[in-house]
Amino acid sequence: MLNGLPQIDDIVDAARRLRGHAVATPLLNAPAIDAMVGGCLLLKAEPLQRTGSFKFRGAYNCISRIPEAERGNGVVAWSSGNHAQGVAAAATLLGVPATIVMPSDAPPPKVENTRALGAEVVSYDRYNESREDIGAALAKDRGATIVRPYDDPWIIAGQGTVGLEVAAQATALGLRPDAALVSCGGGGLIAGTSLALIDHLPGIAVHPVEPQGFDDTARSLVVGERKANDLEARSICDALLAPEPGELTFAINRNTLSEGIMVNDEEALAAIAVAFRHLKIVLEPGGAVALAAALSGKLDCRDRTVVVVLSGGNVAPEVFFRALV
Amino acid sequence: MLNGLPQIDDIVDAARRLRGHAVATPLLNAPAIDAMVGGCLLLKAEPLQRTGSFKFRGAYNCISRIPEAERGNGVVAWSSGNHAQGVAAAATLLGVPATIVMPSDAPPPKVENTRALGAEVVSYDRYNESREDIGAALAKDRGATIVRPYDDPWIIAGQGTVGLEVAAQATALGLRPDAALVSCGGGGLIAGTSLALIDHLPGIAVHPVEPQGFDDTARSLVVGERKANDLEARSICDALLAPEPGELTFAINRNTLSEGIMVNDEEALAAIAVAFRHLKIVLEPGGAVALAAALSGKLDCRDRTVVVVLSGGNVAPEVFFRALV
């Protein structure tokens, strides 16, 4: 930890804590998809992670660091769904009560799964209420610890274990990736992952991929300071709707990332269909944007080896159907 | 090889040939599914195999053994779809022309993928024509080698690499499975897999799982000789519709298998939905029957460690939708 920012050692330490609890997800390759992009894609399958997305990693790392004496007061988190499930599962494993503040329009499976994982769910209106305010008030009432979705050094370090695993897996295959495509909402996954990838694979270009209308990180990278999204913007990628880059995540990302890539809803849905047909992995829209960036040609993958982080698969059947028809 | 039947050494040799060509698919675990069955399921994810099912393994092993001088005449195979794709992909990799005889009612994605993998497709009527006769005539015309879907020692040895990997993966996790559930059509997958599992994990009970109306192996095991299915039987599990056990496969299976389990279409579809929601793996009906046997309680998994082979994921969207609604 340096100036409140996680370093590679913190990611290595997180990997140690996660061993035996998180799934070391496979790095997949599909010749049919490689043929579509003219290059070699190494697809990190985080839908196979516990709770169906990478979020368990950061949540477990973070909650495992709460002192024993404070654990009984529980944790509070806010999330559109994946962080909620990650926190609920990690808290249950560590014997800590969890309360999750979720938007009232979150996909029903995410809400149901969060409850099934043992958490209490409190709803709010995504467009008219502040989840931060609601969560902070709850935490104050109960003396609970807030587990932030991305702007926390231990969360970032936990998500960074994705990058650590990818580097080791690619190296074991004798491959040296030229670039990486990583979905980006608040920026926690890509902050930790870019730190780990660059440490192990110097020179790799790590690109954030964001939904149309939520390209705050791409625009922030251009001007060198945090820019917010239009409050009127909407996207099918419910996992990636953070209002602006995190303070800590952007402090890392401004130094580690290459230019941002933006994909629209149709491109995300098309990537879900390709993963269904050729990869047999269930993706949610937000979990499909990195693959969409490759398939749409927005990152030219020809004759290159490119890491693609498939970040989650918690999708409602009706959205999945829309992708496949 | 002993009396024309593959031995464990033949499976180890197949694994050597497949290295770098087949995917060493992950052995997954999902706490939510474990909670449903009250035990520990180790889920072998063959939908992540090249061409979306285990069939590539046997096909590659078999075609790689054709003498160089005969390869130019090509290979001929008959298949409802998964073996077709496996043969097409393996033949293309090995530079061998492939002709595939497929039923006219095979799922369109399987036919399309087979063509996309470089094979010529010849259609036949599943209920009124003999695919064996059509395939044999084609092979004779062209001097081509027939790649049988299951009743071939090299096919069985190739499919057995699934069992070899499962044994190594379970052992690496420090787990000793009590039982295994493996889908069974002609019996090639379970013949090879049971040989490998029993060799590495003596005492494991390996159960064939078949669709209702296609429980030929279960009935054959009871009486000790091959029994055929009713020609009028129908099932949604298009991958598992062999008319009777293979001669070679049953010569192995009669010695290696525990009692058979039968699941109906609705149970297979329910398993597809569970895999979608909790595993994020796409399953086809035939690829889901082993999981269905566990979820339906037809094999009691309580307090046991059970291997479940998820054998394939090549499913048409409309069938997948039916499972999810």
Image (cartoon, coloured by chain):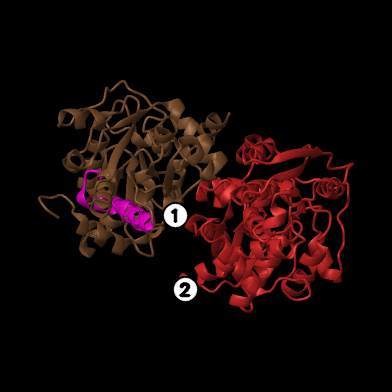
Chain colours: A red, B brown
Task: For mark 1, give the secondary structure.
Answer: loop
Q: Say above or below: B69 vs B30.
A: below
Tell me the quadrant of the picture where the N terminus of chain B can be found: bottom left
Residue B153, magenta (yes or no):
yes
Can the viewer see residue A295?
Answer: no
Whole-percent x, y for residue B155 in the image: 26, 50
Q: Could you tell me if the residues under marks 1 and 2 are in contact, i.e. CB atoms within 8 Å?
A: no
- Along the line of sight, which residue is nearer the eye, B262 or B304? B304
- For numbered disc 2, what is the local secondary structure? loop
Q: Which residues are magenta?
A: B145-171
> Residue lying farthest top?
B232
Q: Main secondary structure of the magenta part?
A: helix
Q: Amino acid at mark 2?
A: Gly
Q: Which residue is mark 2?
A: A174
Q: In the depicted view, which residue is nearer to us: B222 or A321?
A: B222
Q: Please name the residue shown 32% across and 47% down the image.
A: B99
Q: Chain of mark 2?
A: A
Outermost residue to the left: B3
| Residue type at the position of mark 1 | Pro
Q: Quadrant of the C terminus of chain B?
A: top right
- Count every numbered label the image shows and give the total: 2
The residue shown at (56%, 59%) is A44
Residue B123 position in % (x across, y down): 36, 36
Residue beneath disc 1 = B26
Query: Do discs 1 and 2 belong to a common subunit?
Result: no
Picture quarter containing residue A188? bottom right
User: Where residue A293 is drawn, which disc sits there?
Assistant: none
